[in-house]
Amino acid sequence: MIETGSAGQRDDTQSIAEGDPMTLSRLRHDIRNYLNTIKLSTALLHRQRLEKSAYDSLREIDKAADGINELVSRFMGDADAPGLFQSNSDVSSSGK
C-alpha cells in the first residue's frame, strides 16, 4: 500500500486506501486527468492516416486506459465524475 508522510513517520501514517476521502478524491481526479489526456491523444491519432500497425497499437493503448479507469472506479469509486470517462464500447452500446 502507498503510505503518506515520510519514511520516518510510518507509525502515525495511514495508507491512501484507508485515508482521507479528500485525498482519495484528488488521487482519483488526477489519475482520470492523465487517462483523459491519453484517450484524447489516441483519438486524435486515430483521425490521421496511419499504418494498420499504428491503429492496432492505438487500440491497445485505449484498452489499457479503459482498464485502468475500470480499476479506479472499482476500488476508489466513481463519485467525482460518473460517466465522464467512457470506453468506445460504452458509447456504441448506449446508442450514441
Image (cartoon, grey):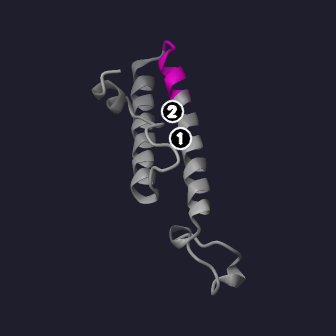
Tell me the distance, in whole angstroms, between the alpha carbons under discs 2 and 1: 6 Å
Residue at the outermost bottom position: 11
38 relative position to 82: left or right: right
Image height check: is 31 above or below 54?
below
Region of the chain picked out in magenta, as a range = 41-49
6 relative position to 51: left or right: right
Residue at the outermost top position: 49
Q: Which residue is mark 1?
A: 35
* Residue 25 in the image, given as x and y percentages of width and height: 57, 55
Element under label 1?
Answer: helix
Q: Is residue 13 magenta?
A: no
Residues at discs 2 and 1 in contact (Cβ within 8 Å):
yes
Q: Is residue 47 magenta?
A: yes
Instruction: Tell me, for residue 39, which label it has, or none.
Output: 2
* Residue 53 in the image, given as x and y percentages of width and height: 41, 24
Residue appearing at x 32%, y 31% in the figure: 89
Most frequent secondary structure within the magenta stretch: helix
Instruction: Tell me, for residue 25, which label it has, or none.
Output: none
Q: Amino acid at mark 1?
A: Leu
Image height check: is 42 above or below 73?
above
- Classify mark 2: residues with Cα within 10 Å, few (<14), some (14-19) or many (20+): many
The foreground one among 39 and 59 is 39
* Residue 38 in the image, given as x and y percentages of width and height: 54, 35
The foreground one among 89 and 29 is 29
Residue appearing at x 45%, y 52% in the figure: 72
Residue appearing at x 69%, y 74% in the figure: 5
Q: Amino acid at mark 2?
A: Lys
* Residue 62 in the image, given as x and y percentages of width and height: 43, 35
Image height check: is 42 above or below 25?
above
